[in-house]
Amino acid sequence: MPEESALSSSGSPGATSPVADPGALVVGADGSLTGATGSYTKQLGDMAGVYRDADAYQALLAERGADALVYTVQEHRNLSSEGAIIIGTSTLLPGRVGAEFAMTRGHLHARADRAELYHCLSGQGVMLLETVDGRSEALPLTPGQAVHVPGHWVHRSVNTGDEPFVTLFCYPADAGQDYALIEQAGGMASLVVTDGTGGWTTRPNPDHTGYRRT
């Protein structure tokens, strides 16, 4: 994904830092982002180890193939320096792997004190949030609702509906992502699973061994 785009030098005398051009964006409820500077996708083959039910994952992989789309991210960034922000959309397709709903890989920011905003544009889902010292929350999101994720919270999106779960996100450009934290802990402490009646619930993940201190 491009690290920088549309940079221009300041016309001010003595300026030493690049000044980015403003970005004119059109954000669609379907996750489209006109004016995006980059994008990436995650396919089913990229999700090995993310779901607890390895047998269900392998069965789905055999049925749908490693190239089956799981989620798409589009973003606009112009600088990666302190003070800049990244704006983008995440489109997470519906589905289940065993009892667990479709989800993103999840992360803590590499600079752990960096916060992030998620605003639901369409669909329905859950923002699963946890701290390294054991706090856990699962906040539902429907169109118009948002979650302000403070720094020091591990977080992932979960699609609990039957249509794409689309969110608009914004976070500091110098935040980075630590994906290994979740894998090293045996997954997040809570699982978002079907409740057997058409809804969702959370249950403890018995494989979770605790997060390393950041």
Image: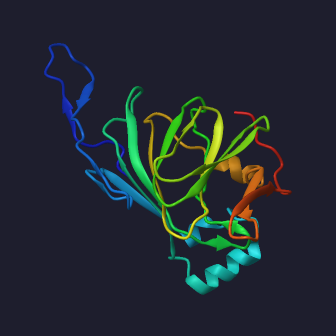
Whether residue 152 is visible here, answered yes or no, is: yes
For the C terminus, the image quarter is top right
Left or right relative to 159: residue 40: left
Query: Which percent across, then down, holds residue 203?
Result: 80, 56
Quadrant of the rendered image containing residue 195: bottom right
Query: Which percent across, then down, holds residue 11?
Result: 13, 22
Left or right relative to 12: residue 185: right
Left or right relative to 61: residue 164: left
Query: Which percent across, then down, holds residue 24?
Result: 22, 43
Whether residue 157 is visible here, answered yes or no, is: no
From the viewer's side, name the closer residue of 1 and 131. Answer: 131
Query: Which percent across, then down, holds residue 134?
Result: 79, 38
* Furthest residue toward bottom: 63
* Furthest residue toward top: 14
Residue 38 position (above or below residue 196): above
Q: How many marks?
A: 0
Q: Residue at x 64, y 33 (%)?
A: 152
From the viewer's side, name the closer residue of 27 and 123. Answer: 123
